[in-house]
Structure formats: C-alpha cells, structure tokens
Amino acid sequence: ELIEILAISRNQKLPQPGEESQILELLIQRDGEFQELMKLAVDQGKIHHEMQLLEKVVEKRDNDIQQLQKQLKEAEHILATAVYQAKEKLKSIEKARKGGYP
C-alpha cells in the first residue's frame, strides 16, 4: 500500500513537498516493525520446537513411571503373598509345637 502511494506520488506532475520523505520514513518504520515481528516469530518457533521436545521427554518419563508403578504393584503382591504364607507356616509350626507338648 505504501509502495503504491509512493509510486502514485512519483507519477504526479506536482508532488506535495515532503510527501515522499514522509512516505519513505513510514515505509522504513513499517519495515522495522516487520523485522521485529519476524524475529519474534522465529523466536516463538524455536520455543515451540523446544516445547515439543520437552513434551516428548515428559511422555517418556510418564511411561517410565507407569512401568515402575506396575513393577511395584507386582512386587507388593508377591511380598503380600509371601508374608501370608509365612504367617500360615508360623501358625502351623505353633500348632505342631502345642500338639507335641500337651
């Protein structure tokens, strides 16, 4: 749009004094704003990429935690069974001792 205005003002027979410099200044200002926005977009793209990598790491850690929880539950079950069997064995040993000594 600014370029069109600049082109039109150049084609006019009597350009307004200072109009071209104002348009050029505005164009330079807009270019600076555009460059800042482009830098911001690049920075945001890098941040987004880093976030995706971190999400993959978190997902892996979650899977590791779930596996460990599963293994802990299995170990808990095995230990609970072993404790129960040990108690039963102790009960039977106690009965046998009492039965042997009236």
Image (cartoon, rainbow, N blue to C red):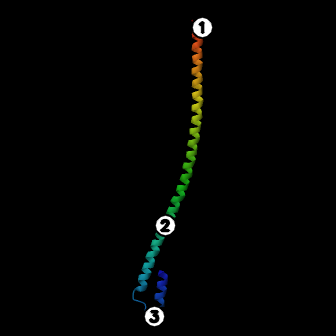
Position of 63 with respect to 35 (left or right) is: right
Q: Residue at x 48, y 65 (%)?
A: 40
Mark 3 — residue?
13
Q: Earlier in the sequence, mark 2 or mark 1?
A: 2
- For this orientation, the residue located farthest to the bottom is 13
Which residue is drawn at the image coordinates 49% and 82% (left, top)? 3
**Image quarter for residue 79?**
top right
Query: Which numbered circle lies on residue 100?
Result: 1
Is 94 above or below relative to 41? above
Q: Report, in whole angstroms, how far the alpha carbon at label 3 lies from the one at label 1.
A: 128 Å
Local secondary structure at mark 3: loop
Q: Are marks 2 and 3 in contact (CB under 8 Å)?
A: no
Secondary structure at numbered mark 1: helix
Residue 98 falls in image quadrant: top right
Vertical comparison of 83 with 22: above or below: above
Residue marked by disc 2: 39
What secondary structure is marked by label 2? helix
Give the mark nearest the N terminus, 3 or 1: 3
- Three-letter residue code for mark 2: Lys
| Image location of residue 82, percent across then percent down | 59, 26
**12 or 80, nearer to the observer:** 80
